[in-house]
Amino acid sequence: MRALRAAGLPVGPGHAIRALEAVEAVGLARRSDLYWTLHAVLVTRRDQKPIFDQCFHLFWRDPKLLERMMQLLLPQLELERPRESEEVSRRVADALGPQKLPGVGEREEGEKPEVELDAVLTWSAREQLQTKDFEQMTAEELEEARKAIARLRLSMAEVRTRRFRPDPHALKIDLRRSLRRSLRGGGAAIELVRKKARTRHPPLVIICDISGSMARYSRMLLLFMHTLTNDRDRVFSFVFGTRLTNITRYLRFKDVDQALAKVGEVVQDWSGGTRIGACLKEFNRIWSRRVLAQGAVVLLITDGLDRDAGEGLAAEMERLHKSCRRLIWLNPLLRFEGYQPITAGARAMIRHVDEFRPAHNLQSLAELARALAEDAPRRAEGLSEWVALAGERRVA
């Protein structure tokens, strides 16, 4: 229980009592029975399952997982990036560190203590947290990042609307109000009333990928979506994996834990496959006329990995691009140097977006907020280079 609580799962005394009662009812004949009994009591959301699974097997000293754990804790040269399926969560590594694993890190009798010198460059913890990848954060750092996201404020650039308001210093004359006011004096004199166009920030539509390849960042991005939804009006949120789900009403709960719990109950395709083209087709057919009115800004959060190999994705992206004021693609894979849109889905998407930005740490989210505060042109500078890379890869 202490390991799960340290890894970030909301496990309290009530959960411990219910877990003991469930174990007494099921018994301890097999380890699999114990695993699924505790899983049924302690895991309440889909994103908690990988953390519980790794903590359970590390606690029972699974040789393979313990070996991966030691590789994560010991200093070593990283020659190549391991596969995603073989990585141990940083939250579990922090919760079950060498000081918490029995028999690990104990000094043998008579062994002299070694003095270690930290020779790396250091700076403030806040600056480190701003640039640190969400996946590499510990449980404490994730909590600090959650608080930082909750304090984030989005100041979107205001745009002109079709409505007007009185303004004595404006150049445009309001003929209707001028004639109506002249009737009060019998029409002898006409006092000119001037008007000015109203300005208002455009609606914001967020479409977030929650498939298996995006599982590392889904929770933090949902926190970001919750902050935006409670910070301003006319924010519409959608998530998709193999199907599209509207979660706008659930993110309007002030309590973030309650909001995420409601989202977990509604969303059925968490950490599954990705069908970007089919989900965007459903959005364009059902929701586009409802939420894309008045020049909405669309944030499309996905890594571009499509199970359908981009089938029908180009046409749906083109329709979405023409229906909104500004389409911004947020891709966590941009954190890697040398990234190129080489997949079929990424090649189909890059041609129909206005901006291409990363979304993997606090700094990238803060830069996004600053970019939305400016009324940028339809096609941002530097996007043509990404389109050229996608074209070269397709020819090759």
Image (spheres, grey):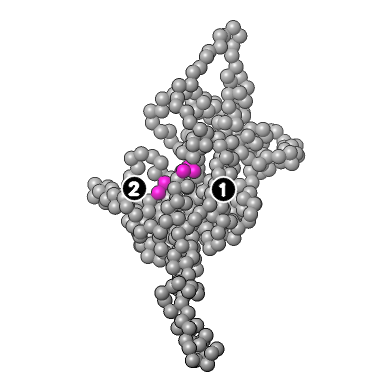
29 vs 180, nearest the viewer: 180
| Left or right: 364, with 1 as reference point | left
Q: Give SS at disc 2.
A: loop
Residue range of the region highlighted in magenta in the rendering:
357-363
The quadrant the N terminus occupies is top right
Q: Looking at the image, is 80 positioned above or below residue 303?
A: above
| Left or right: 394, with 156 as reference point | left
Quarter of the rendering containing residue 57: top right
Q: Which amino acid does label 2 sit on?
A: Pro
70 vs 169, nearest the viewer: 169
278 vs 338, nearest the viewer: 338
Q: Where is residue 334 in the image (x, y as percent from the top left)?
A: 39, 44
Q: On the image, numbered disc 2 is attached to which residue?
A: 341
**Residue at point 58%, 20% (across, down):** 104
* Residue 312 visible in the picture: no
Q: Which amino acid does label 1 sit on?
A: Arg
**Residue at point 74%, 38% (across, down):** 13
Q: Position of residue 394 (x, y in %)?
A: 27, 50
| Residue that lies at the very extreme toward the front in this rendered image | 189
**Residue at point 29%, 52% (across, down):** 384
Q: On the image, numbered disc 1 is attached to which residue?
A: 151
Q: Looking at the image, is 201 positioned above or below residue 338?
A: below
Q: Where is residue 248 in the image (x, y as percent from the top left)?
A: 56, 59
Q: Give SS at disc 1.
A: loop
Q: Do the residues labelled 1 and 2 touch (CB within 8 Å)?
A: no
Kindly report which numbered mark, 1 or 2, lies closer to the viewer in this rendering. Answer: 1
- Within-10-Å neighbours for mark 1: few <14, some 14–19, many 20+: few
| Residue that lies at the very extreme toward the left in this rendered image | 395
